[in-house]
Structure formats: C-alpha cells, structure tokens
Amino acid sequence: MKIAILNAIFILCCCTWKILALPDTIFIGGIFDAHDERQELAFRYAVEKINADRKILPRSTLRAHIEKLPADDSFHASKRVCKLLRNGVAAIFGPQSENTANHVQSICDAKEIPHIETRWDYKVTGDVYSVNLYPHPPALSQAYCDILTQLQWKNFVILYDSNEGLVRLQSLLQQKAFSITIRQLNSDGDYRPLLKNIKRSGETKIVLDVAHDTVYNVLKQAAQIGLMTDYYSYFITSLDFNLVDIEDFRYSSTNITSIQLINPKDPQIQQFVDSWVQGELRHGRNLPQHLRHITTEAALMYDAVHVFAKGLDDLDSSNTIEINTELFCESGQTWRHGNSLINYMKWYSPRPYGGNPRPVSPWPPSPYSNMSRYPYYDRLDGLTGLIKFNTEGFRSDFQLDIVEVDVKEGLKKVGTWTQVGGANYTRSWAEAVETVETNLHNKTLRVSIALTPPYAMLKETSMQLEGNDRYEGFCIDLIDKIATIRKFNYTFQVVADGNYGSKSRTTGEWNGIVRELLDHKADLGIVDFTITYEREEAVDFSMPFMNLGISIIYKKAQKKPPNLFSFTSPFSGDVWIYMATAYLGVSVLLFILARAAPDEWDNPYPCIEEPEELENCFSLINSLWFIIATFLCQGADIAPRAVSTRIVAGIWWFFTLIMISSYTANLAAFLTVERMDSPIEGAEDLAKQTKIKYGCKKDGSTFSFFRDSNIPTYQRMWAAMSNSRPSVFTESNDAGVERVSKSNGMYAFLMESSSIEYEIERKCDLTQIGGLLDSKSYGIALPPGSPYTGPISSAILKLKEDGELHILKTRWWKERKGGGRCVREASSAKSSGAAELGLAHVGGVFVVLIGGMVIASFMAICEFLWNARELATDENASFCDELSSEVKFIIKCSGNTKPVRKKAPSTPEEPLFTYGSYGANYGYSERK
C-alpha cells in the first residue's frame, strides 16, 4: 500500500514537472532577405508541420517571428535581432547574406542564443552557438575532386562569377593532378567573348561555378557559339541544377554532370511540395509557378526547424528548462539553456539507443566532448538526407546525388558521393554505352575525307551527282556499314588542304583532317589515316580497321638480257675448268696406258703374217680425238683393246653420262627462265648506295617515322632524303608513285604496304621491294574526348569478325577500278605455255659453230698452202704456178679422183716407192 502511494506521488510529480517544463507557445525568429521568398515559405511550412505533428513538442506550439531586411544591411539586422530577443525567441534562423549573418552570429554568441544557418559558409572553426545545415565547403570541394577524378578529367576550365567561387573550389585548385585554367564571368551578363576564347583554346571540359539562376544563361550563350556539342563536357557545382530548365540542352548530346542534395523526383520531396502548395491555398495564397519548386536552401531551412524542435524536445526530456526569456541587447543577460540546446542539436539526437531517458550527468556534452562516449544515437533524416554535425557544428557527413542530363529522362541520377566512399557511379557499363548509342541514333555526323584511291574517290559521274553519292571507295563503304550498325546519318566533306594531319615544328599547330577535328568542324576523319603517337595525343582513334607497315615501291626489275654464251650457264666456270682438266688428264692417261699395254700394239698390215713393225693406234692426237668424240656422244674409228684402256674408257663414259645428263637437265631451265636484274632488295640496299634516290610523302606518317627514328639505317636514310636536291619528298602518294614510274629505276618511294598493294595490282611495271620496315594501323580519327569512339570501335570489331573488312578490301584492291590486271596478265602468259627461245638465248651456239668453221677453214687453207709449197719444191716449179694449178683443180668441182704426182728418183739404183693410203698425202712419193 505504501509502495503504491509512493509510485502515484512520483508519477504525479513527473507529470507536473513535465507540464511545467515547456510553455504552450515557443517563439523562434527568422531573418530573411527581402527577395528570398522560398526561405520564408519553407520556414513557415516547417513550423506548421511541427505544430501538426504531436510526436515532437506534443504540448507546445511553435510561433514564428519573421523579419525581412535588405541584403548586407548590418545596422537593420542588429535592430531586428534585438527585437526578436526582446520577444523571447529560443533560436534565430538566417539570414543568408554573409555580412548580416556574421553580425547576427556575434549577437547570438553574446546572448547564448542558438543561431541556425542554412547558407554556404567557409569557416575552419565553428561558433559555439551556431550550427549550419549547409554541406561544409571543404567536404563539397572534396566531392568535386572525387567526381572529376572519376570522370577522368585532367585539363579543364573553371568559370566562376564571384570570389566566393574561388574559395569554394580551393581544394580543387590545390590538386596537382589537374591542369586548371581559371576564368571569371563578366558581371554584365554577356559571356560570349569569354566563351569564344575558351573555344579557340581547344578546351572541352568546363567546371561552372555560378548561381543556379545564372546557369541557364551561360549554357544558352555557350550553345550560341558552338560550345554545346557532343565534344564538350560541363560539371555544374550548383546544388540547385535541378531547377534549371534543361529542355533546350536535353538533345544537344552535351555531357552535363551536376550534383544535388535533394532529389526532386523523390516521393517524399514531391509530397512535401504538394503539401506546401496546398497549405498555401488553404491560407488563401496561390503560389506562383517559380515558387512551386523547392531549392536546396529551402529544404535545409525546413530541416533546420526540425533539428531545432527535435533538440528542444530531447533537451526538455532530460532537463528542466526555462524558455521565452526576454533578453535585451543593452544588458549582459544571457539565456542559460542556450548552450545545452545548441549541443543537443549538434549531436542531432540526445536520446540513447532504446529510447530510455538520458541521465542529467554527464549530459549534455560540451562542444569539445568525445563522441565515442555516446556510441548509440537515433537517426534524424530530413529532406536533405541524414543530418549529422561534427564537433564544430558543420555538416561534413552527407550524401550527394550525381546527376547527368539524359535524352529520355531529362535529369538522371547516375551515382552518389559520400565522404567515406567517394564518388560511386551506380549505372552499369551497359547503361553508359546504351546512352551514348542512343544519342548517336539519327544524328548526322560530318565525315572529313581526303581523295586518295582506293580509300575515297570521286565517281566518274560525280558531276551529275550530289552529296554523298559523288564518292566511292573502301572508306566510303566502311562508313556506310558502320552507320547502318549504329543507325546514324553522315555527310562527307573533303579536307581543304588535302593533308591528313601533321604538326608544325615551329608553331605546334595541326593542319589537315586533324585540324578540322580539333576545331570540331568534323566528327569523323577517315582515309588511310595512320595511328601515330603524335596524332593519338591530339585526337582520339577508333580500333584499327587495317594493319600494315612501311615498304618500298620501285620499278619492277628489268629482264636481264641473255648472255651470248647462255649454254654454258648450267655449269659454273669452275666445273668447266675441271671438265677441261679431266679431258686432258684422261686423254694423256689413255695415251700412256695404250703404249704400255701389249694388246694395243697391232700388225698394221694384216696380209703380212710376220710384220717387222707393230703399230699403236692411240697416238696422243688420236687419244684426244677418242676422248672428245665419246664425250660428245659421237663414234670414233678406233677402240681400245687392252683391259686397262677399256677400264679408262668405261669410267670416262660413265662420267660423260652423268655430266651430259646434268647439263641437259639444267640447260632448258637456264634458257627458258627469265632472270630479273634488280639493283636493290630492301632498305639496307637503299641506305648503302647513292645512285638511286628515294623519298616519301611530305609531312605524312612515313615522313615522321624516318624523322624520329633511332635506328641507324633509317637515320642514314633520313639524312639522305632531307639533304637531297631536288627534294625527294612529294605532296601525295600518287605523285610519288608517278615519279617512280617515270624515273626508269632511279627513284624509289616509301609508303604504306596497303597502298603499295593497290598500286601494283594496276601498274604492272611496279613492285614491292623487301618486307615491312615497321608495323602500324589505320583507324578512324575522332575529336578528343568524343563519346562515339566506343560505338565506332565496336562496330569495326563486328565488321572484322563478320569478314566484311576482308570483303571490302578484296573488292577495292582486286576487283574494282582495274584491280587484278597484272595478275590476269601473268596468268595469261603462264597458260600460253613455255616461252619461245630467241636467238639471244642460243646465239652462243651459233657463235661456236661459226668459230669452228672459221678455224677449220683456216687450217684447210694452211694445209693447202703448205702442200702447194711442197709440190713446188719437189717439182722445181714456182709456188704461184703450183698454187694456181691446185686452185683450178678445186674450182672445177668435177670428179672425185685426182692423179698422183710422182717425184723423179735422184739415182738410177734407188728404187721408186710410192706411198699409198699410209703416209702419202695427195700424191706425195718418197724414195726409201
């Protein structure tokens, strides 16, 4: 009974204490700039919302005292603050102006009244009696750094409109990883001159730090001068970018990224706005359209009032407080509960986990107490997300949404940023690719080309055609197939100067197609465009559509004129010498062996059974005749009889068989195969000689290759080319090929192997010399940072896998425009059979024949003259008479007999012996 009475008394005391803790009406003050209607509306609506919610301050009602004053009017601000203090306000909200806010803060610090702010304020240390719900600027700046790093921005321009912007971007400016150019916008509202300078500088990435109501004007003027295209990217630092009318920029394909603290598409935000509008209607106020969108600062003001109410409610649950105390600026009186209330708000929820009341001691914590002593806290989520302050009263732990302008959805959330996790994109790679491909659909791209066969050419009927129909070629068909895959349109434009793109060594400026891409006068550049390091630094390239290398095009090797003695070609000179030596050696050996062999000595007169003399038919002359006759596969009137001489003859015949067979087999090949006489076989041969000049296209990739090469051979070639007079460089590949054709083998041209293949298919007098000097590729060039590099590359990969690129190359290299002519001519010549042998091939045989006849005739004349001399001596007649008589007999050409002319004996006793067939020559008679 006694315990029940004590419990009842305790409950009654608690209720009585609770009732006495807070008054029915609690005054709060709001100071707003005269033009800031949204802040005032959010403040009023938050008060009404809390009064309607009985979970917070269930027995008290908030009443707002609102004061408006001109911006930067510190004098009137102090008057209004003192007025509010006299009304007994428990906290003061606002203002937004920096000068007046600092003045209000100093008064609140003096009177220990909580000052709640929702403005951008770059302070390192906070005020004791102040909390600021606006994201802390250092944390915001870190968010900028993380997002730009994630976007892989390295070079960009910062455009700002006030000095506040430089302070806001301080952390970003201190990053050494970025190359930053800073430009301040004019205050007159005409930003076009500055934007034109940015366009001329070639910068494509812009950080825009201006108020949200200025963003539209800046982007609109940027679009007027061509800075709102596919190749420009913007990062908007304003947290209210969602309020900007982006309809004019939605279909520009410009990459616009921004951040937001509140998501207008969030159901909670939409419900808040609807309730806001309806609440004003209930009070007879119809909000204009521009006030029906909530700003970040308005949402922060709404959350600020809730933070105050929650902190006051939690303070009331653990302490007996006195509120609505009138304070005077002239006095030194302060509100003794102000310190406790501001600390409760800084920790945003003074109720430990589980809802049990917190003990009076050691709570409330001081601003310098350690958070780890109170590890469990309730969450307080507002319109701006989780509300959490650090010990200085700054909101450094918050979440930002990363948004981008999307064609379909307008402003689309693509990621989030937190202080711990940094920038985290939530969209998948497939979604990013789909977005780019969607932007590419039905878009008309400008394709810059140079007229270079077979890549891009004018049709023969181009004068009667218009637009893209005037052009044909490998690259023309390739673009058409890519456009079919990616569903975009295109228009061709021929580069004015005809250059692909080279960088000036003096000015550093690019020309040709690269210049047009850098100036965004073209969206694609395609021709036989070699991907080089220097070009890759300036523009983007797609995946290669053709792989090749540098080679040499030269006049085809001339047919080597046949040697007069071509029939000796089957054997080398050494073999012929060895054969002649073998012939003489075997002949001498046969002569010696025949004299040594008994069987080779025979009776010269078969009728005489016992001759006084034996004869050996293998004299030295006969041995030479026998060996040569058998070597030439001809018969001889003598034959060996002894075993040894027959062995010599057999081995010689075997040797003859092999040599004659080998000679015959090779002779046909040597007489019918045409030999080519080429003075060079590769780059090494060119570098070693000075007779044949060589060059390449001026300012092309081949030109750069030799100029920048560190290989000794190529360095010598570059020195020779650069010092040649007249110049060996040409303005185009066609000019170089024509020069090779007309130089009669005195000029060689260095160019890409694919172009050489095309030329030698049509010009049969030209050929490729040697292999590839390097390895390179052709690709499609795009402006730097182009979003279409990925889709174009994937389309090329698909064409490569489907074999379409091979089909295109075959069509334009071997089938169209005279392709394959040289191959057809060679095939026709081959099918016609073996080549006929002309006199030049066998002329040497006739020379040998004529030479032999001349020698034989000379020997016959010598014999004839000698015989005439002998007869004249024997007959004691004159040489002329004998010569005349013999000549007359020969000229008669009748009869095959000739009388024997006998010499008279010198003495009667001496018998007369007349030589017959043995030893007598043409009637010689000799007395023995």
Image (cartoon, rainbow, N blue to C red):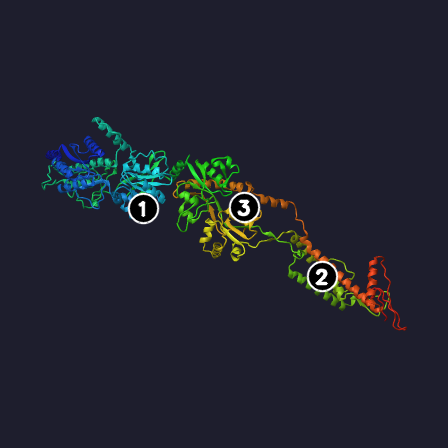
Please state, as top left, top right, bottom left or bottom right, where the N terminus lies in the image. Answer: top left
State yes or no: discs 2 and 1 in contact (Cβ < 8 Å).
no
The residue pinned by badge 3 equals 759
Q: Mark 3 is on which residue type?
A: Glu
The residue pinned by badge 1 equals 181
Residue 211 found in image quarter:
top left
Q: Which tag, 2 or 1, sits closer to the chain's start?
A: 1
Q: Return the x and y of residue 777 as percentages of the image width and height.
A: 47, 47
In this view, 139 is above or below 13: below
Q: Residues within 10 Å of mark 2 (few under 14, many from 20)?
A: some
> Alpha-carbon distance for marks 2 and 1?
97 Å
Q: Return the x and y of residue 755 as percentages of the image width and height.
A: 51, 46
Residue 490 found in image quarter:
top left
Q: Return the x and y of residue 126 as percentages of the image width and height.
A: 20, 44
- SS category of the residue bearing label 2: helix
Q: How many dots with numbers? A: 3
- SS category of the residue bearing label 3: helix
Disc 2 versus disc 1: nearer the observer: 1
Please state, as top left, top right, bottom left or bottom right, where the C terminus lies in the image. Answer: bottom right
Q: Return the x and y of residue 696 as percentages of the image width and height.
A: 49, 50
In this view, 705 is above or below 109: below
Q: Is residue 328 left or right of residue 486?
A: left
> Looking at the rendered structure, which numbered label has been put on residue 306?
none
- SS category of the residue bearing label 1: strand
